[in-house]
Image: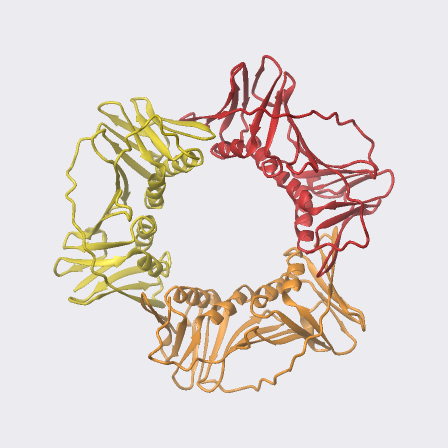
Chain colours: A red, B yellow, C orange
Amino acid sequence: MLELRLVQGSLLKKVMESIKDLVNDANFDCSSTGFSLQAMDSSHVALVSLLLRSEGFEHYRCDRNISMGMNLGNMSKMLKCAGNDDIITIKADDGSDTVTFMFESPTQDKIADFEMKLMDIDSEHLGIPEAEYHAIVRMPSAEFARICKDLSSIGDTVVISVTKEGVKFSTRGDIGTANVVCRQNTTVDKPEEATVIEMNEPVSLTFALRYMNSFTKASPLSSTVTISLSSELPVVVEYKIAEMGYIRFYLAPKIEDDDEENKS
Amino acid sequence: MLELRLVQGSLLKKVMESIKDLVNDANFDCSSTGFSLQAMDSSHVALVSLLLRSEGFEHYRCDRNISMGMNLGNMSKMLKCAGNDDIITIKADDGSDTVTFMFESPTQDKIADFEMKLMDIDSEHLGIPEAEYHAIVRMPSAEFARICKDLSSIGDTVVISVTKEGVKFSTRGDIGTANVVCRQNTTVDKPEEATVIEMNEPVSLTFALRYMNSFTKASPLSSTVTISLSSELPVVVEYKIAEMGYIRFYLAPKIEDDDEENKS
Amino acid sequence: MLELRLVQGSLLKKVMESIKDLVNDANFDCSSTGFSLQAMDSSHVALVSLLLRSEGFEHYRCDRNISMGMNLGNMSKMLKCAGNDDIITIKADDGSDTVTFMFESPTQDKIADFEMKLMDIDSEHLGIPEAEYHAIVRMPSAEFARICKDLSSIGDTVVISVTKEGVKFSTRGDIGTANVVCRQNTTVDKPEEATVIEMNEPVSLTFALRYMNSFTKASPLSSTVTISLSSELPVVVEYKIAEMGYIRFYLAPKIEDDDEENKS
């Protein structure tokens, strides 16, 4: 028996919107500690890792660990039917091949039940070790999203370079080149507007903008994003989910080839 | 000579938006008592009935009963050119084969005349007898529209079931099933937010969501919708037009076939 | 060396949005007095003339007159990456075949450089003599844009007729005819809402609505538009750019053929 009641149902809606275009089918893993997902994107390049800790739910009952295979497109269709103020409850009976999403309006005058068939999905849970990063950048999520979108109008890849002074995002394409520099800035009125750089050594890595743009769909979940960079590791783009957990995207750097021109 | 002056011209704009996709061509009937329309949708499944009573017009002159055949797409194109605060006057000379829509801005600084050719349209005026219904549901029009839209993402048809406690909207499709229950609720701050159920006997009927979604385009006309259901009669979905009349949509229930699966 | 710093960078963004669909490639001419452009539209029917005077820039350095050929679509892609509150600087080194657009956020925390290749464009600078017009209409730019858009849903051309009392915009198409009259009106609360007519003699001229609609994309630059009409000259549709200059569109009247019916 599984019953997870989330008062701030809009969080789950936002989570789905942020991953449904990246991942087609995935197993949601439910244990006593939380509701989580780990999945490769459909082209097996990027990895998504989601955690919603049990403490963040108003009511959390998970009698035994289960893994529920869902089509994220279908799940998203159902969650779109929840109002932004609705309470969402995820329910599954033991041994059942369905999951039920229940949406309660704040006044309790409208109750909706959406039942979806579960799928069998082969998946391998990758252990992701805690790692040391050369540089960690925390910045406003809207600004990071804007930069990735802007650079996509010029080129296909972004070079992210971190120094003590700031982080530089660069691209080049048929029509020209673009460089955007965000300076470290911690003296802002609101902490979520700060750009904070922790750096052990300078790093400069190249990534496909297509994936970066996909990751930024998680921006509604958090006002800040944390980008962890190391020359030997995939970048981690993390959005915290208030008091509940996080969604993290992993993407391997491209080996930059100077002869290769990006296409606009 | 016909001259109908409607100070709240936006009403006529909203009326057109609510029926133009359902009905291609129709006769508008004008008499001393009001301006009305009755028309089948282009696939002859649903019926629209509109009444704008003469008392609702600032000036209403209709010397003799006339029937004016109009293409609703073209009429809608013209009415879209009226500003939302404009006064709209409908004018036609006796024996003329055109109708003129005049739009006056509130300041009278801008006056527009749009003249449209009339059409000859064969139509049969159906007498719609007053009927007894098994159940009548009054609910917020925006909520009804939301439910029809939401269920359309899952299935093709909706089962509307009324009991004393509430009204249930259900669908099923390839990806799963959905049930939305709205409880009777008359203790709300604003009367237009109430869900009120008058029931003589329980009723459960199936309708094509495509049509229901089309009907809900009339939602801007009224904050509430009234759904009258009877197992022997077409459902009536009615939107009142403040102090002027109504727009009513009639749709026959589907004979539900349990073997038939809806497609998403 | 060229360096032009424009504090209100959004002006340049709006200028690009207003001409990029009309003109593909054009030379921007830079001299000590200002930054200007003169170009025919891609079908060689309409002419655009832009002037941004040097006094309107916070910093304006132009060591010698230069003409920079740019693809306006690419330039627009780059300027779209500037924030609406950003300061924009246009930079070019002597003899360089590139131009750089620098965007500074108001807080100076984010600095972007976009570098674009220049093009060689053959162009002939037409002298446009100051002329006497039969009638000059000044009216709210939003209203002119609305009228052109509205009439486009009925016909392909607009007849603009000016008398002392007002200006009439007319069209006809398959579905009917439309006339919109704006009365002279100088007693308004805000001067930008006035419709002012200076007339030496009545004039009635026909223009392609397609071009008029294109010109109205400059509406965000100014709350008023000035339309100068003369039977022997192209119409001038002018949008002033506050304290800096103007953008002017020139279009020859159509020789109206009464046999020709517009298509809707």
Establish if A15 lies above or below A216.
above
Q: Eyeballing the image, is B55 above or below A97?
A: below
Identify the residue at image location x=80%, y=48%: A256
- On the image, the x and y values in percent for residue B18 come to 33, 48
Q: Position of residue A16 (x, y in %)?
A: 57, 34
Find residue A203 and report its horizontal and vertical position in percent.
Answer: 84, 43
Q: Residue furthest right?
A: A201
Q: Is residue B232 visible?
A: yes
Q: Quadrant of the N terminus of chain C?
A: bottom right
Q: Left or right of B202: which side holds C113? A: right
Q: How many marks?
A: 0
In this view, the residue in front, A146 or B263, is B263
Camera-nearest residue between C51 and C22: C22
Quadrant location, the C terminus of chain C: bottom left
Relative vertical location of residue A95 with respect to residue A264 in this rendering, above or below: above
Residue B208 placement (x, y as % from top left): 33, 36
Can residue B184 be seen in this snapshot? Answer: no
Q: Is residue B227 left or right of residue C43?
A: left
